[in-house]
Image (cartoon, helix red, strand yellow):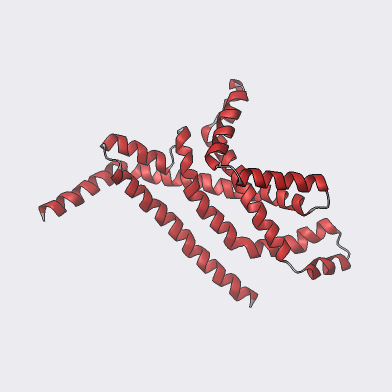
Amino acid sequence: MNALTEFFNTQISFIQKFGVAYLFGALRTLELSAIGVVFGFILGLLISLAALSNNKILKKLSKAYVEIIRGTPMLVQLMIVYFGLSSIIPESLGILRNKILLCSMAVSLNSAAYIAEVIRGGINSIDKGQMEAARSLGLNYKQSMKEVIIPQAIKNILPALVNEFIALIKETSIVFTVGVSELMFVAKAASGSQFNAVRPLLYVAFVYFILTYSLSKFMGKLERRLNVDKN
């Protein structure tokens, strides 16, 4: 009984000491992931449209971008963006050397490659008759894509976008390597303070699980809602 009481007292003491830090670390993780999905979606949309265009140069460039990003580790991309841009941006533009900004850029560039493929698949899933019907109504290609095809494609790929957000929540843990105070950074700091590597990591694993599980449940409800709307 005494051992159990001591165990719970130890956990309560740890939470009291590092709970706020874990909370802010989780918020920073969500911030980086959200930025990655939003700007990754914008860039991914442009890349997917380039891949579907009739311009051979744009198609090759978009394919090369996707293959390079998907074929290299995110950690390597982070290091290239972070240290590469830090070395060429003058100190007078210090705001552009902000850690969060540079890490967000790296995450967005990585996410864009995966989202581009998701969007391309979503656009290709739309029946070709939709484009033909739009063109028959007098819309040009750009108007047809903007008003008819892309809205339907986005509706179809929403679950996949949520999945990408979930994946980014876990993948952004690598930004602790450049000193960004997200969840893993907090866990490493707590490990050094407590001289215990396991407990802080167990807590950070629990926080990651709560975040991803909550989004997974949301995605399940979203899919059911979309299926109902389709029927």
State whether residue 98 appears in this view.
yes
Q: Position of residue 182 (x, y in %)?
A: 44, 41
State the residue in front, 227 or 61: 61
Residue depicted at x 82% and y 56%:
142
Residue 215 lies, in percent from the top left, at 48, 59
Q: Residue at x 28, y 41 (%)?
A: 17
Count of numbered badges drawn on the protein: 0
39 over 141 or under it: above or below: above
- Residue 19 is situated, as x and y percent measured from the top left of the image, at 32, 45
In the picture as drawn, the residue positioned furthest to the bottom comes out as 231
Determine the image quadrant of residue 117: bottom right
The residue furthest left is 2
Relative side of 186 to 103, left or right: left
Percent coordinates x, y for residue 218 in the rendering: 50, 63
Task: Please identify the quarter of the rendering in which residue 163 is found.
Answer: bottom right
What residue appears at the point 56 percent right and 68 percent down from the top-left corner? 223
56 vs 17, left or right, is: right
Q: State the residue in front, 144 or 164.
A: 164
Asked whether, in this view, residue 194 is left or right of residue 21, the answer is left
Depth order, front residue of 19/162: 162
Answer yes or no: is residue 89 visible: no
Residue at 48% over, 39% down:
175
